[in-house]
Amino acid sequence: MSGEALDQFLQALDARDASPHTQRSYAHAVGDFLGFLDERRVDWRDPPRHLLRAYLAERSSGRARSSVAQHLAAIRSFYRFAARAELTAGDPWGAIATPRLPRRLPRVLEIEQVERLLAAVDSDAGADAATTAWRTSGPLAHDPRTHALALRDRALIETAYAAGLRISELAAATLDALDLRRGEMRVLGKGRRERVGLLGRPAREALREYLEHGRPVLLDQAPRAVAESPGEVFLNHRGGALGVRGLRYRLDALRRRAGLPDGVSPHTLRHSFATHLLDGGADLRIVQELLGHASLATTQVYTHVSPGRLRSAYDSAHPRAHRTGRA
């Protein structure tokens, strides 16, 4: 019976277009808990509290709080599904205190740090010089693939920062979804929700240079590349689609070259995109739409990440913000 319920739960996840990673993670967590109950010959629909506490203690031993919290979130999601499907009366974990993670503010780059990241691309392979050469008399005497990769990296960072895309959305970006004239890129986000990412002039110019002078060079590196041209925008050095792992590896290399702190990731550019928009006066609901968040509450975390914005508002609004001396 528990196996049938788990199968139905996983089918429901698949119907909601949950990612393969989420499906595997939830299958492992729920399967582990149901196996724990089966070993003790306990009905999964109404497990006693002492067994729930025992399972929680067993899972918590030697594991990070974040790992335990994610594991239990999957199990509780399973019971919510089971209750909606009338397979069980409710969530037995509702009366059990489970570990809660403190809400951490996302890491955000300063505008100057974004510029340093782009400068690292230019210094990496002389991208500016390469671009000038392509425009005038053709490629320089060195390896054209090096310059093509530099053009790709600049387009990659400019696009990620301009449109606030997730790393999976960057990897999946396709040529037919890109409209440089309008400065738009259609992407398919979480829950298969489609939205339009907007591209400013630097991103459009970087993409145009890459598509005209970088991507064809990379495409030539793959056997039968012309006949089997991938539709993805960003290619690797072999002419195939640049995947999520490749994106992470490349950005981390540029992060180190730019002297940025550990922990800066592709998602940091997305956080920076949202924060800089709000700092510039953008409406929160507009930022929600651009990020592709289903809930405004998810976007609201970005209203807390800019002390400079709070200081500016305080200085301009509080009647004693600038007074000195005693009253």
Image (cartoon, rainbow, N blue to C red):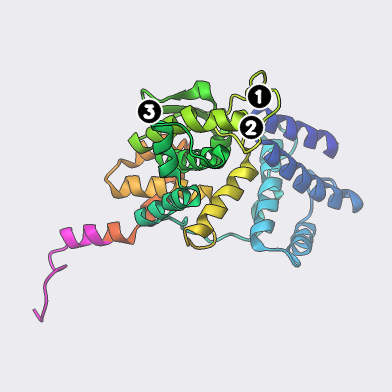
Looking at the picture, tell me which residue is in the foreground, 49 or 176. Answer: 176
Question: Element type at marker 1?
Answer: loop
Considering only order in the chain, which callout, 1 or 2, is on the residue closer to the N terminus? Answer: 1
Place residue 81 in its image quadrant: top right
Place residue 232 in its image quadrant: top right
Q: Amino acid at mark 1?
A: Ala
Disc number for residue 183:
3
Residue 164 visible somewhere in the drawing: no
Say few, some or many: other residues with alpha carbon within 10 Å of mark 3 (under 14 / 14 to 19 / 20 or more). Answer: some
Q: Amino acid at mark 2?
A: Gly
Q: Which residues are magenta?
A: 311-327
Considering only order in the chain, which callout, 3 or 2, is on the residue closer to the N terminus? Answer: 3
Question: Is the N terminus in the top left, top right, bottom left or bottom right quadrant?
Answer: top right
At which x and y percent is residue 89?
71, 40
Residue 293 to residue 267: above or below: above
Magenta-span inclusion, residue 111 = no
Distance of mark 2 from mark 3, alpha carbons? 25 Å
Dots 2, 1 in contact, CB < 8 A? yes
Distance of mark 3 from mark 1, alpha carbons? 28 Å
Marks 3, 1: nearer the viewer: 1
Disc number for residue 225:
1
Say few, some or many: other residues with alpha carbon within 10 Å of mark 2 (under 14 / 14 to 19 / 20 or more). Answer: many
Magenta-span inclusion, residue 319 = yes
Disc number for residue 239:
2
